[in-house]
Image: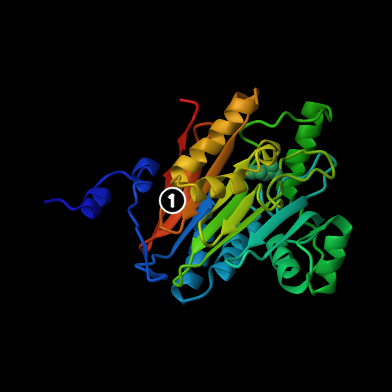
Amino acid sequence: MITRRKFLKNTTLTSALLITGVNEAFVKNNEKVNVKPLVISTWKHGLAANNAAWKIITENGKSIDAVEQGVKVSESDPEVQSVGYGGLPDRDGNVTLDASIMDENGNCGSVAFLQHIKNPISVARLVMDKTPHVMLVGEGALKFALNNGFKKENLLTEKSRIEWEKWKIKKNYEPEKIDINNHDTIGMLAIDNFGNLSGACTTSGLAWKYHGRVGDSPIIGAGMFVDNEIGAACATGKGEAVIKIAGSLLIVELMRNGKTPMEACKEAINRIVKKQKDFKDFQVGFIAINQNNQIGAYSIQKGFQYALYIDGENKLIDSDYYLK
Ligand code: SD4
């Protein structure tokens, strides 16, 4: 007889299969049994980020350290033009970054509209660990980073500068319509060997945005949210659309009310579809996990991918989507 596990191994991995509860943990006398660690993150560059996070998880590290170190890989990679160093600038040519992080105890930190710092996620972590606040923005966030030993750097790479120059000529400085191609934030969720959940989200935001624009990624509850009792979620795509429905909090609350991560991600996308008439013109994707080791992912448009590291394997998976 073919076991479910073998069947899954022999079958092309689709998100539809992954949500059926492949990795069930259960709670017995308040202790988690069969906890399976996992790392999940958005887009293809999530694969490299997952590797760094997984290393920490396998060394019995904490999920909060795993997600921080994981997304730092994308932030530091100049080829990833949607996150950190090398990110595409705003319409005035400034690379401005947003990031947030949240741990299993509900502690969180974020930075928004931060310039000149390559790894905003670590500044967000420091806001969480070292200040009585949750969020620092702009000049204040930069000052805080510099006071804590971060280096001021030019984040605009030659490649991104050239793209910006081309955009300026082509678009005549007209505000860009947010389309389905000009973003690729990394959001990452992880469960460690102790069954604890954490999340991180970091981005250079939408390319050619207005100077000073802040998206969903640093907004706790919009771009990312963690509740260790229930699960965690994060978002990618048009931040304005995600903020309007408080997307990540919505997903966690739907899971609290009994939805699986997949059902919850779908319902959040349905909410956008129902309330935002121009939904066909942009992309939003969500990923989510719960305390039963189930995962979910769903987007408006075709093309959203996520990277899942579980059972010692790191895979890129096509998300299911609304507009078929
Ligand atoms: C933002 N959500 O700033 C981010 C952009 C992005 O995948 O996701 N992209 O609106």
Q: Quadrant of the C terminus?
A: top left
The residue positioned farthest toward the front in the image shown:
29
Going by the numbered disc 1, the residue's amino acid type is Ile
Residue 34 located left or right of residue 261: left
What is the x, y in percent for residue 133?
79, 65
Q: Is mark 1 within 8 Å of ligand 1?
A: no
Residue marked by disc 1: 295
Give whichever of 15, 247 is nearer the camera. Answer: 247
**Residue 304 in view:** no
Q: Front-most of 102 and 148?
A: 102
Q: Residue furthest top?
A: 277
Q: Is residue 98 above or below residue 70?
A: above
Q: Secondary structure at mark 1?
A: strand
| Colour option used | rainbow
Q: Is residue 301 above or below residue 43?
A: above
Side of 237 where 263 appears, left or right: left
Residue 283: image location, x then y, percent: 59, 34
The residue depicted at 41 percent of the width and 53 percent of the height is 294
Please indicate, yes or no, whether residue 42 appears anywhere in the rendered image. Answer: yes
Is 280 situated above or below 71? above
Residue 210 placement (x, y as % from top left): 82, 38
Residue 312 pos. (x, y %): 37, 64
Q: Dot 1, how many residues are within 10 Å of its Cα: few (below 14), some (14-19), or many (20+)?
A: many
Query: At 69% from the left edge and 37% from the top edge, which residue is drawn?
Result: 244
Task: Judge from the rendering whether residue 5 lies leftward or rightward of residue 24; answer left or right.
Answer: left
The image quadrant where one finds ligand 1 is: top right
Q: Residue furthest left?
A: 1
